[in-house]
Amino acid sequence: MSKVNTILQKLRGIFQDDRVAMYYHGNFDDRFTDKLISIADYDIAKKNKRRMAFLISESFQNIIRHGESDLDTENAGLFGVRGIDPYLHIFSSNLISSSAKDFLATNIDTLNNLNEAQLADHYREVLSKGKINEKGGAGLGLIEMAKKSHRPLQTRFVEKKGEIYTFNLQIDLIVNEDEKVGPDDNPVNIDSNNEIYDTIIDNDILFVYKGEFSEELIAPLIKLLEDNAAGESQSMGFKIYTTAIEMMQNISSHASGLRPRKDGLFIIQYTAGGYYLATGNYIDGNGQDVLKRTLNLNSLSREELDRKYRHTLKQSVVEERKNANVGLIDIRRTLMNDINSEVLTLTDGNYLMMGIEITAEE
Amino acid sequence: MKALNIASTNFSPTVECLNGEVKITGKSVLEDAASFFEPLHLWLKEYIASSDTIKVEFNLTYFNSTTAKQILKFLMAIDDSGIEADVTWVYPADNEILLERGQEYGIMLDLKIKFKPV
C-alpha cells in the first residue's frame, strides 16, 4: 500500500463517525472563512447557524491574531471542523510565543471556571476596562467563544522549541438541539484532534475533507481551492483546480448508491515536486473495473490518451450516454503521472482509494 | 428567432444567443452540465431549421469534462447541419491546456475553428 493510501486509510478510520470533517493547514486569511462556514453549516439547524458561523470566524481570527507566522514559516496554522452528532467541534492550532501562552492559559482557565452569569459579568468588565493585549485582542473573543459554546474550551499547549508553543484550541458546540444529549454524549477529547494534527503535520497535508460530495457541498470546496490555487503559478493552479474538480465529481457520480449519503474523503498533500491529490469512497461492486481502467490509462502515451479521450467523448454524444466518462482520461493526460488506485475490502463494504501527483513542469 | 440569455454564476458561464451570434463566456464546473446546456441545444435546433449562418465564440477560462461533452454536442449539431459557421475559440494566452482543448474540437469535427489568445 502506498504511503498516501496508508494516510487515507488512517483518516477514514478517524473520521468514520463524522458527518463532516474538514481541516486546512496553510496560510490563513479571511477569504477562507465564508467558504469554511458554508461547508460546515450544511445540515445544521437554522437557529444555530449564526452561532456556529460566529465561532468559526472567531476561532479563525484567533489564529491570525495570536499566530506567530514569522516564527516558523513551515508550520502555518491548522484549522478544522468536525461534525459528530450532536456536536460540531471547531479546532484551531497555531504557534505562539511564551508570553501569548501565559495570556491565553490564564484567561481560558478563568473562563472555564465561570458560569453563564459570571461569564456575562466578566465580558462587561473586560469590555469596560478595555485591557488590550500586545496582539490587539482584549480576550473578548475567547469570552465570546466560552459564552456561545456553553461548554468549557478545550486547550493543549505543546512546547515546540525554546519559547515557542503550539496552541491547540477546541470549541464544542451542540448544533442540533432537537437531539437528546445523554450523560455519555461527551464531546470528542482534544487529544483526538492532536492525533489528526500530527497526521496532517507529519505528512505535509494541506487540506482534508470528509463528508458528502453532493453538488451543493462541492461548490464551496471548489471556491476554496480556487482561492488557494490563485497563489500558485498559472499552470500549477489550473492543474490543481482541474484535477480536484474531476476527482470530487467522480466521487459524486460513482460513490456507493446503497448508502444514505454519497460520502467520501478528499486530501491534498504537499510533495517534493508539487501536490498529491487523493480520494477515498465506498463503492458498489468490487472496484476491479476501475483498477483495470486506471492500469490501462497508466500504460498509454500522451498521443494514445488524446485519441482515447476524443473517441470516448464523441461516443458519449453519439450514443447519448448519461456520462461523458472522460474525467479520468483527462486527469491522466493533463498530468502525465500514474493514477494510483486501490480497493480495500472492509467489513462494511469496498473502499476505493485513488490518487495522483501534480508536478510542476520542468 | 427569440434571443437566449443565461446569466453566469460562480460555477456556470454566461450564454448569449442573439441575431445568429452565440457567446459562451466564463467558466463551467457544473456537475450536471447537461441540464444547464439543454436550453442552448434547443435554441440551436430551432435556429438551424431557419438559418444559413451562425457565429460562435467560446471564451472559457475553465471547463470540466461534463461541460466538454456539452460543447461537443453543440458543435456537432452545427457541423452536422451543414450551416455556414464562424467559430472562434478565445483562450488565455498563457494557458496552453485551454488552447489544446479547443484544438481538439477541430480534430473531432469538420468545423474550422479560429483561435484567439487574450
Image (spheres, rainbow, N blue to C red):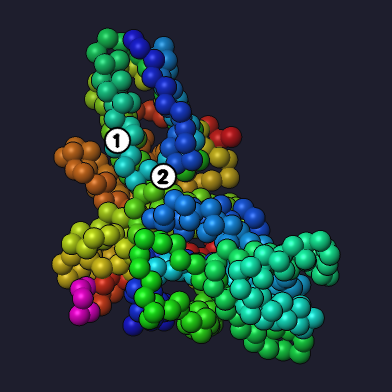
Q: Which residue was labeled with disc 2?
A: B29
Mark linked to residue B35: 1
Please identify the quarter of the rendering in which residue A108 is found. bottom right
Which percent across, then down, holds residue B64?
Answer: 39, 46
Residue nearest the viewer, comparing A160 with A83: A83
Of pointers 1 and 2, the one earlier in the residue sequence: 2
- Would residue B85 be found to the left or right of residue A318 on screen? right
Please identify the quarter of the rendering in which residue A178 is found. bottom left
Residue nearest the viewer, comparing A57 with A354: A57
Which percent across, then down, holds residue A140?
Answer: 72, 64
How many C-alpha atoms fall within 10 Å of the one at disc 1: few (<14), some, or many (≥20)?
A: few
Q: Is residue A270 magenta?
A: no
| Magenta extent | A345-350
Give me the residue at 26% from left, 46% from top. Answer: A324
**Is residue A156 something that shows in the picture?**
yes
- Tell me the chain of label 1: B
Residue nearest the viewer, comparing A201 with A32: A32
**Is residue A279 something that shows in the picture?**
no
The kind of secondary structure element at disc 2 is loop
The kind of secondary structure element at disc 1 is helix
**Residue occupying the far front of the picture:** A117
Which percent across, then down, holds residue B19?
Answer: 41, 11
